Image (tube, grey):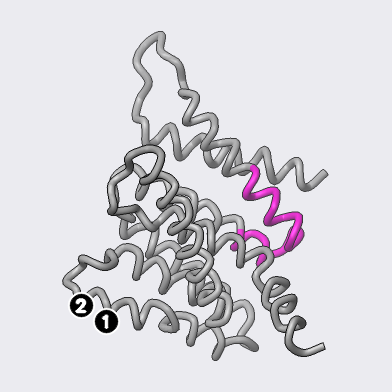
Amino acid sequence: MYILLAFLLGSVAGGGYAALRRGPASPGGKALSLPALLTAAANGALWALCCLRFGVTPDGALCCALSSVLLAAALIDARTGEIPPLCSLAALVLGALRLVLDLSLWQTRLLGLVAVAGPLLLLLLLTKGRAIGGGDVKLLAGCGLFLGWKLIILAFLLACILGSVIHLVRMRFFGAERTLALGPYLAAGVFVCLLWGQSLLDAYLRLFWR
């Protein structure tokens, strides 16, 4: 029952975001377009998965909020090529709240803040933004604080693999440009690791230590 409720609440939240982004509807026009409805449904599905994984808990609520931030960052980056600072700030605030709620993992979480974002910041400075965008770095810092260093590294690796494969296909068959928006793939990698990252790491380690 609570999974359905999470889906409905997430859909309402996603629909509200889509309506705000769209602006006031014209008289007699549709309140929400098909893309907006799909955004609402996607946000509802993300919330349902988070509640299924973490239950109705404070941690589950934080994960629902982060999933919405990731969805917004992915959609905006795919459309504009930039991740808004507000998304990165929201991820950072959520990471700080999760740290406060569970201080037993404070070292892992603080290392996560810089584990990926630190080297990428150096890359950003050395290449003057040609290799990676500042929005990607800031989003990874916030998500790293939320996930911890192990899972944010895994999330970044998954994002790179996913982005490389999909974008190569898009370039080969759909004529996409060489430059890609990394935000959607980062969001996907972080969300996968949010729900199943530790299980993936454990399964990988069992291949070598049985």
Q: Quadrant of residue 25?
A: top left
Indicate the amino acid at tag 1: Leu
Indicate which disc residue 122 carries. Answer: 1
Q: Main secondary structure of the magenta part?
A: helix
| Front residue of this view, candidates 113 and 96 | 113
**Labels 2 and 1 touching (C-beta < 8 A):** yes
Q: Residue at x 61, y 86 (%)?
A: 105
Q: Is residue 46 magenta?
A: yes
Image quarter of the C terminus: bottom right
Residue 35 image offset from top left, x and y in percent: 47, 30
Residue 160 image offset from top left, x and y in percent: 45, 65
Q: Which residues are magenta?
A: 45-63
Left or right, 41 with reference to 203: left
Image quarter of the N terminus: top right
Q: Residue at x 44, y 83 (%)?
A: 115
The answer to whether any part of residue 169 appears in the image is yes
Residue 176 image offset from top left, x and y in percent: 32, 43
Find the distance from the CA under tag 2 to the CA under tag 1: 5 Å
Indicate the amino acid at tag 2: Leu
Left or right, 199 with reference to 148: right
Q: Residue at x 69, y 71 (%)?
A: 200
Q: Residue at x 70, y 46 (%)?
A: 6
Q: How many other residues sit within 10 Å of disc 2, few (<14), some (14-19) or many (≥20)?
A: few
